[in-house]
Image (cartoon, rainbow, N blue to C red):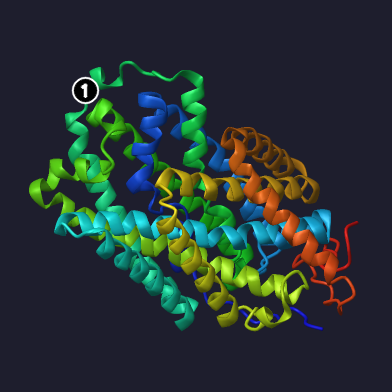
Amino acid sequence: MTTRTNTPGTLGTARGTALYLGAVLGPGVLALPHLAAAAAGPAAIIAWTGLLALAIPVAATFAALATRWPDAGGVATFTRAAFGDRAAAACGWWFYSVIPIGAAAAALVGAAYIAAPAGLGHTATLTIAAALITTAFAANHIGLRLSGTAQLILMALLIALLTTAITTAAPHAHTANLTPFAPHGTTGILSAAAVLLFAFSGWEAASHLSGEFTNPKRQLPRVTALALAIVAAIYLGLATTTTAVLGPDAATRPTPLADLLAYGFGPNARTITAAAAAVLCLGAVNTFIAGASRLGAALARDGAMPAPLAKGHQPGRTPHRSLALLATLTAIVLTAAVTWQLDLDQLMRATSASLAAVTTLACAAAVRLLHGRARATALTATTVTAAISTALAWYLLIPALVGAAALTYLHLHQGKPRPDTLQDTEPERAPAPPLAQGAP
């Protein structure tokens, strides 16, 4: 049987904030303004604003949970403590299995932006996508400390570039571009919100890194607040500027960030955007891989995934086997996306469906685990996330099927040895139940 160690983590506030930003500020800023505008027109601003408002209770809820249970299991640990094995296994599998889809989508977005300025063809674009994914996995195999330092540099460059895009394009805004404001009505706004969930789903990814902080109780609230403030400023600025400057063209041009940067950098905008695409994709994929690989190891440690994957689950160590499985699954998804010619909107909605399921269940767990104002915040996060998720329609079949697979695996391995109880880090709270002892 395996027990959790008290090995201290390696992440400080600066690198931790960079990793959190990498989970939320991903390649969505390259493609989502266009997809949201296509779905809702200028009213996409309502979807952006609404999801930013939702991000506040969601981020606060995950920070509260991660402070009390700083463990690589992240959402699975929280869900286990509230609802037991079966819910935790389903939640963990949802997040672990969606990473290959999200990583493939992110890499394809970045590769398209990188290839465009050079006039590269389809084969070269796919090669670039594979190189981006390989780089992110290699950084994680080397170790989280290197990944966190690289992330700090990447996020600083990214924020500077996005700020430049917003400030140089803003003077060219026109109120006429805001009409007709909602050409597709409420349905279009809900559709935009559904695809935009991709851009606001990083908080659960970062929760798996909570055990890597040197002092989670002190650092996590600070890191969450910093990341949320930066994300809100960037997303609101980008959404408003894209709509007011590009107008109806925002729905038809697939490269809105390059169009905004053209006001400040002229013909060089596409080359600069290509560099930004590499930064965005590496940052997001790096963080999601880091979180998911540790989740896979923690699930294996607790009996919800094959035992060999548990190696390296302790804070400060690298789960190489879990990383190798994720790399294999990502390669399969990328190949399938190319073979079946899946478009970006489909990949992002598929990713959003599973991440929305993870967020909803983890926040519901918080309603049961937390008290007072924190519980009220978690209830708000659960209710609103679940409501928006319904706009994803049949894409919700993906988490349903993955959840069924997780429960089947757990049922087939119920006779296996059990791990020891994983205790809450706060002595005054009751210990969380062990993952592999059945539902309560």
Whole-percent x, y for residue 224 in the image = 53, 54
Quadrant location of residue 178? top left
Q: Is residue 134 above or below residue 372?
A: below
Regarding residue 359, the answer to whether it shows in the image is: no
Is 202 in front, or is 62? 202
Is 54 in front, or is 259? 259
Whole-percent x, y for residue 422 in the image = 79, 71
Regarding residue 7, the answer to whether it shows in the image is: yes
Residue at the front extreme, as displayed: 339
Is 125 in front, or is 290? 125
Quadrant location of residue 169? top left
Question: Is 258 left or right of 429, judged from the image as shown?
Answer: left
For disc 1, the marked residue is: 174
Q: Residue at x 79, y 59 (%)?
A: 407
Is 435 in front, or is 338? 338
Q: Is residue 387 above or below residue 396?
A: above
Residue at the left extreme, as displayed: 267
Q: Residue at x 12, y 48 (%)?
A: 265
Whole-percent x, y for residue 221 in the image = 57, 56
Q: Is residue 173 above or below residue 375?
A: above
Question: Is 131 left or right of 90, judged from the image as shown?
Answer: left
Q: Residue at x 41, y 54 (%)?
A: 26
Q: Quadrant of the N terminus?
A: bottom right
Q: Quadrant of the C terminus?
A: bottom right
- Tell me the SS state at disc 1: loop
At label 1, counting other C-alpha atoms closer than 10 Å, the crowd grade (few under 14, some 14-19, many 20 or more) is some
Please state which amino acid type lies under the numbered disc 1: His
Whole-percent x, y for residue 110 in the image = 32, 57
